[in-house]
Image (tube, rainbow, N blue to C red):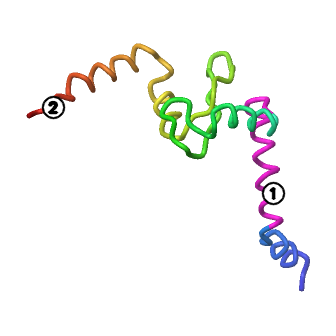
Amino acid sequence: MDKKRKRRLYEQRPEVRARESKRKRESHLQKKYGLSINDYDYYYHMQNGRCAICSKESKLYVDHNHKTGKIRELLCHSCNILIGHAKEDMFILQEAINYIIRHNTIST
């Protein structure tokens, strides 16, 4: 068996894949947000594993201010995308709330 095949088989082992996934996650948190895995875990536990906006138990993502880089809290994918698509603009978010209120009439 050649070296490349041995390497591929080794990398497919579940324990190797899990270790590599953890290493990549730690590297991503450190490079992008300056967070250690312990920092992330602290946020996660302080929020009881729930999104800071909708309180859904889900995979949580680091939310940060794109201008200052300051970390806010952890959000689920949907809430993180919501903030991003609104460009972190409170006026846009308030207008979206107003829009929903205007069109959320309950007919009886």
Mark 2–mark 1 Cα distance, whole angstroms, equals 51 Å
Counting from the top left corner in percent of width and height, residue 19 is at: 82, 58
Q: Secondary structure at mark 2?
A: loop
Counting from the top left corner in percent of width and height, residue 101 is at: 25, 23
Task: Tell me how many marks there are.
Answer: 2
- Dot 1, how many residues are within 10 Å of its Cα: few (below 14), some (14-19), or many (20+)? few
**Which residues make up the magenta segment?**
15-35
Dividing the picture into quadrants, the one containing residue 104 is top left
Residue 5 or residue 38, whichever sits in front: 38
Residue position for label 1? 20
Counting from the top left corner in percent of width and height, residue 77 is at: 53, 41
Amino acid identity at mark 2 = Ile
Residue 72 or residue 30, whichever sits in front: 72
Residue under the image location 77 percent in, 71 percent down: 12
Quadrant of image for the C terminus:
top left
Amino acid identity at mark 1 = Glu
Quadrant of image for the N terminus:
bottom right
Residue position for label 2? 106
Residue under the image location 53 percent in, 34 percent down: 80
Q: Main secondary structure of the magenta part?
A: helix
Residue 3 or residue 106, whichever sits in front: 106
